[in-house]
Image (cartoon, rainbow, N blue to C red):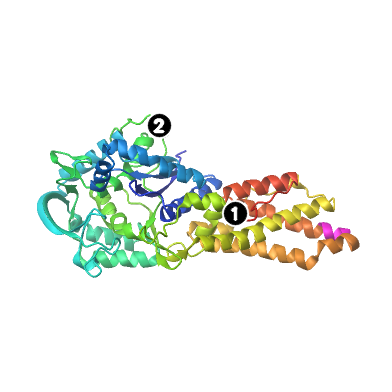
Amino acid sequence: MERKKFYITTPIYYVNDVPHIGHAYTTIAADVLSRYYKSKGEEVFFLTGVDEHGAKIAEAAKAAGKEPKEFVDSLVPAFQNTWKNLNVEYSEFFRTTNPAHEKIVQKFVSDLKEKSFIEKRKYEGLYCVACERFLQPDELTNGKCPDHGTKPEKHSEENYFFLLSKFAKNLLEAIEAGEYQILPESRRNEVIGKIKAGLEDVSISREKVEWGIPFPGDESQTIYVWIDALINYYSAEKIYFPNSHSRGGGNLLKMDPRVKPEDDFVVWPPDIQLMAKDILWFHAIVWPAMLLALDLELPKKVFAHGFFTVGGQKMSKTRGNVLDPNKLVQKFGADAVRYALLRQFPFGEDGDISEEKIAARYENDLANGLGNLVQRTISMINKYELKTQNSKLKTETQNSKLGKLVEELKFDQALAEINGEVSRLNQYIDENKPWGLAKSNKEKLAEVLGFVFQSLSSLVPSLSPFMPETAAKMKKQLETLEPEPLFPRLD
C-alpha cells in the first residue's frame, strides 16, 4: 500500500536576523498543524530552516571579520534554540549551504535553461538592498520600500531572467480550478489581480554577489538568493526522501547523511506552505511558475498570514519593540506563548500583540481558567474520596468540530472553543457547589465531579497540538489525581 506524507513548510528564515515573534508565529502555526495531523495517524514531514546566501550576509560577515560560512554557522543555533524553547518539533531543519541543495539548485536552473525559460538581458531598475530585490514604482510608498522605509537604489546590470510572463494563463487556470489554493481569500484575490495586470519576467541571477550558488554555465554570476531559497522545498524532498516516487523518473541524489533509504513515501507536492504576506509574491507566483516550467506538481495550499503590531506600533528595531520569543518563554512558558499568539486574532489577518496582552491571556484564560479548573476538580475528587474511573480516560480522540477549525487554520476560533468549554465547566462547578453537595447529596456530588473530570479528559487531545506540555501534564494529573499548578502565578 502506497504511503503518503503530509508535507508542511515554513519559509526558510534569513539567518542574518535574530528570531523574532513573526518568525515564531509562522513556525508555531506549522507545528500545531504537524502535531494535529500526526494525532490523526498521518505521516508528517515538517520542514523549516534558514536562508544563508546573499549580499546582506556577505556584508555582515565582512563587518564581523569572518568568512561567510563561518559567520552563518555562528547564527544558525539561534533559530534552532528558539524552536526548541517553543517546543517546535520539526522533521528537518534545512540550510541552504547544504552541498546537496546547492547541486540540486544548479540542476533545477539548468533544466529551466534547457527548456528555454531563461534568457540573459541587461536590466535597470530600483533595487532595495534590504529586500534583495528590484521593486516596481507602484510598489513604493512615498518613493521608499514599504517594508524597510528606505529609498531603493538605481541599479543596472546584465542578469539571467526567468520568463515568468509565459505562465500567467497556466497560473490563473490552476488557481481558478482550485488545484492550487491561495489563502486567505483576500490574498487569493490579490494574486489573481497581479496576474491579470500582467507578469514581467524576473531576474534570477546577480552579477556582483559572490556569496551564493554559482549560476550554471556562467560563474561570473550567482543564482539570486530568492530563487535559491524557494527551491529548498523541492531539494529537501529529494535529499531526505531519495526514493519518493511522487515525481517519477530520474535517479535522485543521495548526498545527505540523514537520508533514510527505506523511505519510499509519496512526498511531493507540499500539502501546505505557510508564510507572512510580504513574501506572497515569490511563493504564490514566482515559485509555482518555476514548477510549472519543469512539469512539477504545484503545492496544494499556500497560506499567507498577516503582520504584528506591538502595542499598536509597527515592530521595528529602531522603536525597540521587537519581541524576543525566548524572553517571552522565560517569563510565561512555551505553551502560554503558543496559546496567546494564536488566540489573540485570526491567523491570516493583521493584529496587535504585546507582553501585556500575553500576560492577560496567561492570567485570565490559563491560570484562572484552565489551570484553576484542573486543580480544583482533582483537589475536590481527592478531598471527597470519589472514584473517577481514571483507567477509562478517553484522551485519544480529537473533537471533530475543533479538528475542522484547525484544518481550516482558524486557530483563534479553536482556542476560543476550548476556552469557552473551560469557562462553562468552571461555571458548572460554581452553580452545582460540590462543597455543599458533599454534605447533602453524595450521589449528585459524584455525578457533578465525574462529569467535569471526563470533560477535562476529553479536552486533552484538542489542547495537545497547541499546548503539548500542558496537555501531557493534564493527562498525568488526571490519571494520578496529583494536582500541581499548570500555570503558576506570575511574579
**Quadrant position of residue 323:** bottom left
Figure quadrant of the C terminus: bottom right
Return the x and y of residue 435 as percentages of the image width and height.
Answer: 83, 61
Residues at circles 2 and 1 in contact by the CB criterion of under 8 Å? no
Q: Could you tell me residue 44's position as x and y percent?
A: 47, 44
Real-space Cα separation, disc 2 to disc 1, in angstroms: 32 Å
Give the extent of the magenta segment: 442-446
Task: In the rendered view, tell whether residue 366 sits above or below residue 477.
Answer: below
Task: State the predominant SS element of the stretch in magenta.
Answer: helix
Closest to the observer: 148 or 35? Answer: 148
Q: In this view, does 419 lie above or below 112?
A: below
Q: In terms of sequence position, does the residue under pointer 2 or pointer 1 come before the other?
A: 2
Position of residue 293 in the picture relative to residue 87 (left or right): left
Q: In the image, which disc is placed on residue 258?
A: 2
* Residue lying at 20% horizontally and 63% vertically, measured from the top left: 136
Q: Is 445 within the magenta?
A: yes
* Label annotation for residue 462: 1
Expressed as whole percent of the image width and height from the top left, the position of residue 217 reads 13, 38
Reply above or below: 315 against 7. Answer: below
Is residue 55 left or right of 121 when viewed as pictured?
right
Instruction: Name the image quarter holding residue 212.
Output: top left
Amino acid found under the numbered disc labelled 1: Ser
Of the residues shown, which amino acid type is indicated by label 2? Arg
